[in-house]
Image (tube, grey):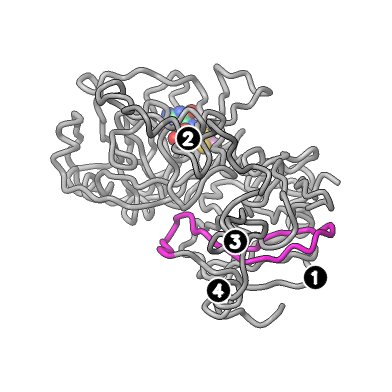
Amino acid sequence: MTEPTDADNDLAQTSRRRFLHGGVAIGGTALAGGLVGRGDALAAEGDNLPPNVPEWMRVPGDPMGSQPYGTPSPFEKNVVKNISKNLPQYLSASGRTPLQDLDGIITPNGLFYERHHGGVPTIDPAQHRLMLHGLVDRPMVFTMDDIRRFPSQSRIHFLECSGNPVYKKPYGKTASDLVGLLSCAEWTGVSLKLVLQEAGLQPGAKWVVAEGADAAALTRSIPIEKCLDDAMLVYSQNGERLRPQQGYPLRLLLPGFEGNMNVKWLRRLHVTAEPAYSREETSKYTDLMPDGSAREFTFYMEAKSIITRPSGGQRLAAKGFHEITGIAWSGHGKIRQVDVSVDGGENWQQAQLQEPILTRALTRFRLPWHWDGSPAVIQSRAIDETGYVQPTLAELLAVRGDNSFYHNNAIWPWHVAADGEVTNAANA
Ligand SMILES: Nc1nc2c(c(=O)[nH]1)N[C@H]1C(S)=C(S)[C@@H](COP(=O)(O)O)O[C@H]1N2
Ligand SMILES: [Mo]
């Protein structure tokens, strides 16, 4: 472990030299900062490159109104969800966020990962109801209008499927293949605590069994402590109403808890003394430990991180300066520190954390790197505010054994070859 690098110092060092080389020379002077490209790309007559006026400046652009709901540039058409071809897409579907193509910490709604056990229902919000019953003084049935009359709150949190990623080779090739069942959004809705108080909890209320209105009727038991803490009934995501894939018109959000417990298309909350022991918390989402016991009701997603650039499937075009960047997150709270190694885990340097650093949200990290053109193994390791350190895969397997399927929060190293190609080092 090297001394933590002072972020300002790092930046000062990198800004004293030019980041990129080979800027186009005009009259013998390099473009300020060496911004772009190659001399041989200089415009020929009629080209769109400097010094010519590009064709899109010569005529007016598209009129307003052709796209009442905006879409990305056609040049970004490859930035889409990564849909698994192995799963039967109707009954057990998943689409992964292309993490390696995104910046910042917020996942655009169209690229938010999806995971469904019985398809995506089309629900008319006017006919949707939330029933709250069991160990309460006043059983209630809420319309969506009723839910929206409660005081609202907005918070930024990640959501991650606990099947993200698998434990066995071959591991995914890209960051999305590996941990793309992960996204982060600003959620708006109602504190579940407020709604439970409206109904009045009775003594002995220890669990809330949540049920979805999909064909899977997905059911999970939530400990009452979480329901009275930061749990939310969510109707909006990044400012607009939930997408159908994310549970329109209403979902449960349990910040930091495994994705499966965040019941979508929420129709029922049954307050009970005991958990339901539903399929999703017995046969699924439990891990078989080496001693034969089952690790169940795991709840929290533990600290994790991944380098998204450079990452598997990408190629470094040239040696020299590259920013290493990625994301870190923890179900237990804020990210305290992210370490990055560029030498296969021998030495670690502290990365800069981009603000805001929010509890149970993705946190962006960065480290300036000078790649000398020789093969390298780069990886990141997250430490959360509880002091928990993200383990290596070997460390994790030593504890969990061979039969675990969920809750893999291991470090993923990327191999950078001499030709710049980046691959998953764990597959080597
Ligand atoms: N009703 C219902 N809720 C559900 C699911 C489902 O299939 N049905 N899938 C769960 C799983 S396994 C995960 S990981 C998250 C995925 O949420 P997302 O599709 O909004 O990303 O929703 C959970 N809630
Ligand atoms: Mo999941």
- Give whichever of discs 3 and 4 has the lower sequence position: 4
In the foreground, 357 or 149: 357
Distance between mark 3 and mark 1 Cα atoms = 39 Å
Check disc 2 and report its element: helix, strand or loop. Answer: helix
Q: Nearer the viewer, mark 4 or mark 1?
A: 4
Confirm or deny contact between disc 2 and disc 3 (CB under 8 A).
no
Rendered position, 237 above or below 219: below
Confirm or deny contact between disc 2 and disc 4 (CB under 8 A).
no
Which numbered dot is residue 30?
3
Give x and y (percent) for residue 256. Answer: 46, 52
- Give whichever of discs 2 and 3 has the lower sequence position: 3
Position of 398 compared to 81: left or right? right
Assign ligand 2 to one image quadrant: top right
Determine which residue is flagged by label 1.
346
Quarter of the image with the N terminus in it:
bottom right
Residue type (three-letter) at the residue carrying disc 4: Leu
Residue type (three-letter) at the residue carrying disc 2: Leu
Confirm or deny contact between disc 3 and disc 1 (CB under 8 A).
no
Q: Nearer the viewer, mark 3 or mark 1?
A: 3
| Residue at x 33%, y 56% (from the top left corner) | 229
Q: Residues within 10 Å of mark 4 (few under 14, many from 20)?
A: few
Distance between mark 1 and mark 2 Cα atoms = 36 Å
Which numbered dot is residue 111?
2
Position of 416 compared to 159: left or right? right
- Give whichever of discs 1 and 2 has the lower sequence position: 2
Distance between mark 2 and mark 4 Cα atoms = 32 Å
